[in-house]
Structure formats: structure tokens, C-alpha cells
């Protein structure tokens, strides 16, 4: 797995989940008059312009090349494009840094796909589609560790667990794993990472995007054991396609994502790129 970019990955690690703000930038455009290809408000006539950061890292993209349609977000981008009526050669990719993507003002792209969590603060500056990925919790351990081959949530109940205070990860540990011993709670993510690195704990629980970063860039000889099942109830952090505020594409992107969900295609893409090939199976 390629080493993740520090800035983007750390931005992901600290992104907060929260209810959607009522003052959404997409509120005026969620009911499009038409999603016919020739009626879409595009930046370039006849072309769908999609942005992401560079480097474009695995498992979200493959070989730092968004145009190959591989990796989870690469595949989702082309699946959405297909629902809007675009062929692969009608998609144009632009580079947009993670931090600048949600800054206020006009955009040079139709939408950006870059593991951007939807938050009320960001929705004051830009618009988001419905979620295309609900963030789940990942379990990280050291290779050769006692729990590296765990297949169930119940097995993790016997582990010494590190987790950061005030996170959805801590909620998941308490509500889903319910460990026999109280988890070791740390003030910062790096402190929790160091606890695993120094073998003070057996496993580290963080959101899955952060788990990919931890194993690629923070702890040598570490691995993702798997991911917890999607929790029921409460507020779920999710990634959305980002557009400029008031974009007329918002409703059509929601429609495309809805079709991908209802057909099961989005779940298949997730299974292929975030579960199977990325080595993060859902624990039973």
C-alpha cells in the first residue's frame, strides 16, 4: 500500500462527524429540473470535470492515476459519471488539494472526490452530495500479535485496546466490542498509536481511513485486522462528493448515488476495494 500523504490523512483523522447543517449549500438545487446529460450545468460542455488530490493514494485510487477507474473512489467516480450519461473518455480529471477543496468560492471542477467528510462547517462554504461512503471503525494490530487473525468482534473482547478520547472509535469500543477490561484512553491519536507501537496494548481502534494511514505510514509491521460492522443509530460520519455552493448538479449526483446504492453496485465496489483487496474484512 502506498504511503499516505500526511496532510490529507491527518485531516481525515481529525474530521468530525456531526448532523447536517440546515443551511446547506445544496439546498436550493436538490430537486433538479432535469438530469439529462445535455441539460447538466457543467464547467466544460460535454465533459464531466472531476477533481481529487495528488498523489491519489490507495485504496481510494490505484497507481496514483484516477483516470484508470481503479480504487474505491476511482471506481465510484466513474460509476457516478456513467449514471449521468458520460463515457470514460468524457471524464476530465483535475488536481485539487484536500485543504483547498472546501474553501469558499467558485470551483473549476464539477465535483471533487477525496475522502471529504461532510460537516456543517464545510457546508457553509460548499455543497455536498449524499454520502457515498459511511466511515467505519478499523482494528489495527502488530504483525505476529495475539489478535492478528481475529475473525469476530467477540474475540476482541479479550484484547487490551487503545483508543482516542472523544471519538466515534471510543463509542464503538464501548458499544460493540464491550471489552472485558476498560480500554486505554489517550488524549491524542499519536499517543494511542505509540501505545500499540510500544506493545502496551494489543490493538488500536480508529476510523478505517485512519487505519489505512497508520499501517502505511505510522507503524512498521502493523496490519488491519478488519473493520467493525456499521453501527446502528446515532450520527454516522460519511464522505460526500463536493461541489461549489449552489451547484445545479447536487440533485443529479444524489440521484446517481441513490441508484448505485439501490442496485447494490456501490456495495460491490466497496467490497472490492475497501474489504477484499485492502485487507479489511468486516468482522462478524
Image (cartoon, rainbow, N blue to C red):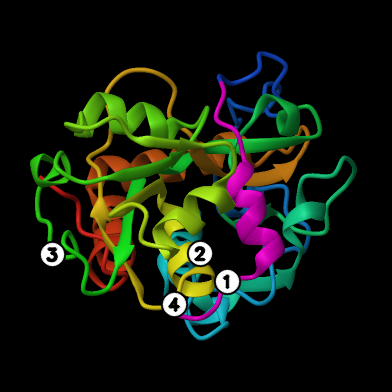
Outermost residue, bottom side: 63
How far is the residue under mark 4 from the one under mark 2? Answer: 11 Å
Q: Nearer the viewer, mark 4 or mark 2?
A: 4
> How far is the residue under mark 2 from the one under mark 3?
20 Å
Magenta span: 1-18
Instruction: Tell me, for residue 213, which label it has, or none.
Output: 2
- 178 and 67: which one is in front? 178
> In the figure, residue 180 lies in which quadrant?
top left
Q: Nearer the viewer, mark 1 or mark 3?
A: 3
The residue under label 1 is 4
What's the distance in space between the residues labelled 2 and 1, CA to CA? 6 Å
> Where is mark 3, residue-wise?
149
Q: Answer with left or right where residue 117 lies relative to residue 109.
A: left
Please tell me which residue lies in front, 21 or 171: 171
The residue depicted at 20 percent of the width and 58 percent of the height is 281
Q: Earlier in the sequence, mark 1 or mark 4?
A: 1
Q: Secondary structure at mark 1?
A: loop
User: Which comes before the other along the chain, label 3 or label 4?
Assistant: 3
Q: Is residue 279 covered in magenta? A: no
**Rendered position, 197 above or below 203:** below
Q: Is residue 10 magenta?
A: yes
The answer to whether mark 2 and mark 1 are in CB contact below 8 A is yes
Nearer the viewer's eye, disc 2 or disc 3?
3
First along the sequence among labels 2 and 3:
3
In the rendering, at what x and y percent does residue 117 appear?
58, 41
Query: Where does label 4 land, which residue?
Result: 220
Measured in 3D between alpha carbons, the distance from the residue under mark 1 to the one under mark 3, in whole angstroms, is 24 Å
Q: SS class of the residue under badge 4?
A: loop
Amino acid at each position: 500500500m502506498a504511503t499516505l500523504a500526511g496532510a490529507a490523512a491527518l485531516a481525515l483523522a481529525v474530521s468530525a462527524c456531526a448532523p447536517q447543517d440546515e443551511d446547506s449549500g445544496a439546498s436550493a438545487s436538490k430537486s433538479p429540473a432535469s438530469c439529462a446529460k445535455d441539460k447538466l450545468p457543467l464547467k466544460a460542455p460535454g465533459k464531466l470535470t472531476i477533481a481529487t488530490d495528488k498523489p491519489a493514494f490507495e485504496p481510494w485510487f490505484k497507481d496514483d492515476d484516477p483516470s484508470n477507474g481503479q480504487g474505491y473512489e476511482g471506481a465510484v467516480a466513474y460509476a457516478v459519471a456513467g449514471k449521468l450519461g458520460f463515457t470514460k473518455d468524457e471524464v476530465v480529471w483535475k488536481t485539487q488539494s484536500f485543504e483547498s477543496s472546501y474553501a469558499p468560492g467558485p470551483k473549476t471542477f464539477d465535483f471533487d472526490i477525496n475522502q471529504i467528510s461532510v460537516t456543517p462547517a464545510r457546508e457553509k462554504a460548499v455543497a455536498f452530495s449524499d454520502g457515498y461512503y459511511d466511515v467505519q471503525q478499523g482494528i489495527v494490530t502488530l504483525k505476529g500479535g495475539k489478535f492478528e487473525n481475529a475473525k469476530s468482534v467477540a474475540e476482541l473482547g479479550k484484547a487490551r485496546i487503545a483508543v482516542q478520547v472523544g471519538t466515534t472509535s471510543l463509542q464503538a469500543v464501548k458499544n460493540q466490542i464491550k471489552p472485558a477490561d476498560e480500554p486505554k484512553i489517550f488524549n491524542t491519536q499519536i499517543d494511542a498509536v505509540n501505545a500499540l507501537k510500544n506493545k502496551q496494548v494489543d490493538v488500536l481502534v480508529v476510523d478505517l481511513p485512519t487505519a489505512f494511514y497508520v499501517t502505511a505510514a505510522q507503524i512498521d509491521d502493523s496490519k488491519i485486522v478488519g473493520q467493525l460492522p456499521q453501527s446502528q443509530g446515532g450520527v454516522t460520519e460519511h464522505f460526500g462528493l463536493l461541489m461549489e455552493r449552489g451547484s445545479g448538479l447536487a440533485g443529479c449526483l444524489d440521484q446517481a448515488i441513490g441508484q448505485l446504492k439501490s442496485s447494490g453496485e456501490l456495495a460491490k465496489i466497496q467490497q472490492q476495494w475497501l474489504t477484499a483487496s485492502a485487507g479489511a474484512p468486516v468482522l462478524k
